[in-house]
Amino acid sequence: MNREPLREITDEEIRTFREDGVVLLKGLFDRDWVERVRNLAEADMSTPGEMKQELAKEGDPGRFFNNTFLWPRNEDFRDIVFNSPAARVAARIMEAGKVNIVFDQFLIKEPGTRERTRWHHDLPYWPINGDQVCTLWLALDPVDAASGAVEYVRGSHKWGARYKAEAFLGEGRYKEDLPPVPDIEEMRGDLEFVQPELEPGDCTVHHGLTVHGAPGNATADRRRRAYVTRWAGDDVVYYPRPGIQPMLRDPDIPSGGPLDSDLWPVVWRDAR
């Protein structure tokens, strides 16, 4: 399996990420990586675990499955984080000299899932801060609007705002004193949106402050499986606050210090 992306990332793709806060990257992961992660998804969904969540509400005929911090607890996921193209893609897009893994995650919407992904942005959930924070969303199935393709508000990473984390399960669990996410639906006529369609092996990369959400999976026979990795670059530091998403464990580093630790190791570094 290829450790490097199947093609070079272009300067234009980097500019798109910088300006829009999100970029679609076609054909970077080979079939072997995709098939391997698909198999891991099936195994993970069938085995209960302490960090797994079912996000669809009672009465929803589908299933919205979430699991986080996979790589520290499973050698197969560790190999994907450290040896797939993901870290190199994140570093290239962010123009970072090194990248740390923050955590990995499955976000899976089965056919018929009504539950949408609320409008939110990522960075306020986590005890880190900096500009070089991104999420890589790897498609394991063909994805379009009907099956739950993520919709991004173009340029929202430049709004200069941080919004309170939205709880997908357990209302009121996040306590940080921040303004709520604006009513994006009410503002729809004044905003620009990006909703990429993906094939297996394609990915999107979005900035940690890009506002995004997603519909349910309205199809009857198409799954929407995504393996998501969260990455931090050169300028990112530890920024603990109460009332945010808990990490797998305390990183045992000082506030304001670099992330480099057993919890958030450096996965890729420029050797030059």
Image: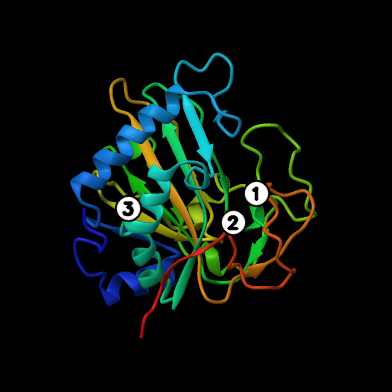
Viewer-closest of 63 and 85:
85
Q: Which residue is mark 2?
A: 263
Instruction: Name the one closer to the observer, 81 or 115.
Output: 81
Circle 1: residue type: Met
Measured in 3D between alpha carbons, the distance from the residue under mark 3 to the one under mark 1, in whole angstroms, is: 25 Å
Q: Quadrant of the C terminus?
A: bottom left
Q: Position of residue 270 (x, y in %)?
A: 38, 78
Residue 246 x/y as whole percent = 69, 47
Residue 90 x, y percent position in the rendering: 40, 65
Q: Is residue 101 left or right of residue 111?
A: right
**Labelled disc at residue 36:** none
Q: Which residue is mark 3?
A: 203
Q: Gap between marks 3 and 2, in whole Å?
A: 25 Å
Tell us which disc is closer to us: 3 or 1. 1
Among the two numbered marks 3 and 1 on one chain, the one whose residue lies closer to the N terminus:
3
Q: Quadrant of residue 179?
A: bottom right
Q: Is residue 11 visible?
A: yes
CB-based contact (under 8 Å), mark 2 and mark 1: yes
Foreground residue among 2 and 234:
2
Residue 250, picture quadrant: bottom right
Marks 2 and 1, how far apart at CA: 9 Å
**Depth-wise, is mark 3 or mark 2 nearer the camera?**
2
Q: Secondary structure at mark 1?
A: loop
Secondary-structure class at tag 3: strand
Residue 30: x and y in percent read 20, 51
- Hey, what amino acid is under mark 2? Leu
Binning the other alpha carbons within 10 Å of mark 2 as few (below 14), some (14 to 19) or many (20 upward) gives some
Identity, as a three-letter code, of the amino acid under mark 3? Cys
Secondary structure at numbered mark 2: loop
Disc nearer the start of the sequence (3/2): 3
The residue located at (37%, 51%) in the rendering is 79
- Return the residue at label 1: 247
